[in-house]
Amino acid sequence: MLSHERVWAAIDALAARHSLSASGLAKRAGLDSTAFNKSKRASADGRPRWPSTESLAKIIEATNSTLDEFLGLVEGQRAEKGRSAPEHTSAVPLIGFAQAGAGGFFDDAGFPAGQGWDLIELPTRTTENSFALQVQGDSMLPLYRNGDVLIVEPGATVRKGDRVVVKTRSGEVMAKVLARRTSGEIELLSINPEHPNRNFSLGEVEWLARIVWASQ
């Protein structure tokens, strides 16, 4: 059975899947940036308000998703309520991209480890495995600006078209879009059109993790 809470949570989950805030998703879909604000989810008298079918159609189209995928997110909210979720926290470890290329900050699976991390408070739910990378410089324009914070989730499912952070065994750390992954290599599209796309054999990749949220 549908509920207001699960539909709104599915919108938030769709935004997170594409590394957007709810307002960022609204803007991508050509809607007012406040369309999905918390204040718009209830009427003036406090009664729950449904998102319009037009707005749902627009965000599905804007993210190249399908109705079935969105309904899957709605169902996922019910499943999540039916089992104990991992503990969430609003504080995650933070380092810059340049630091991330150095050794000692991650284990072999790409989970945060070692010393030297700062902590950052976030207005979004995270898991105990999440960490934050701060963008440095203009190499990720126009999507990410200097100082933006990307929340990375090691172990999250990664699909074609997802934005990801990749660390190579040579120490490079980069944010790209996953274009293709085979049993032997990955193909990455650059966020900034002035930078080349990259191809790596899996043996060259230390870890790859999905970007689940960005401060924008």
Image (cartoon, helix red, strand yellow):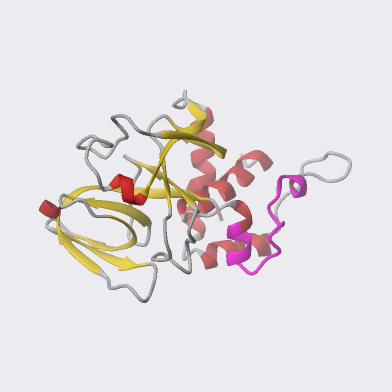
- Classify residue 28 as left or right of residue 43: left
206 or 82: nearer the viewer: 206
148 or 156: nearer the viewer: 148
The magenta region covers 24-40
Vertical comparison of 46 with 61: above or below: above
67 or 164: nearer the viewer: 164
The quarter in which the C terminus is drawn is bottom right
Q: Report if residue 30 lies within the magenta region.
A: yes
Q: Residue furthest right?
A: 45
Q: Residue furthest bottom?
A: 194
Q: Residue at x 35, y 54 (%)?
A: 164
Q: Residue at x 70, y 53 (%)?
A: 51
- Classify residue 182 as left or right of residue 124: left
Vertical comparison of 206 with 178: above or below: above
Q: Residue at x 42, y 56 (%)?
A: 136
**Residue 137 occupies quadrant:** bottom left
- Classify residue 145 as left or right of residue 9: left
105 or 162: nearer the viewer: 105
Give coordinates of residue 130: x percent, y percent. Answer: 40, 37
The quarter in which the N terminus is drawn is top right
Q: Residue at x 52, y 59 (%)?
A: 67
Give coordinates of residue 147: x percent, y percent. Answer: 49, 54
The image shows a total of numbered marks equal to 0
**Residue 93 occupies quadrant:** top left
- Classify residue 11 as left or right of residue 115: right
Vertical comparison of 201 with 126: above or below: below
Q: Report if residue 84 lies within the magenta region.
A: no
Give coordinates of residue 170: x percent, y percent. Answer: 15, 52
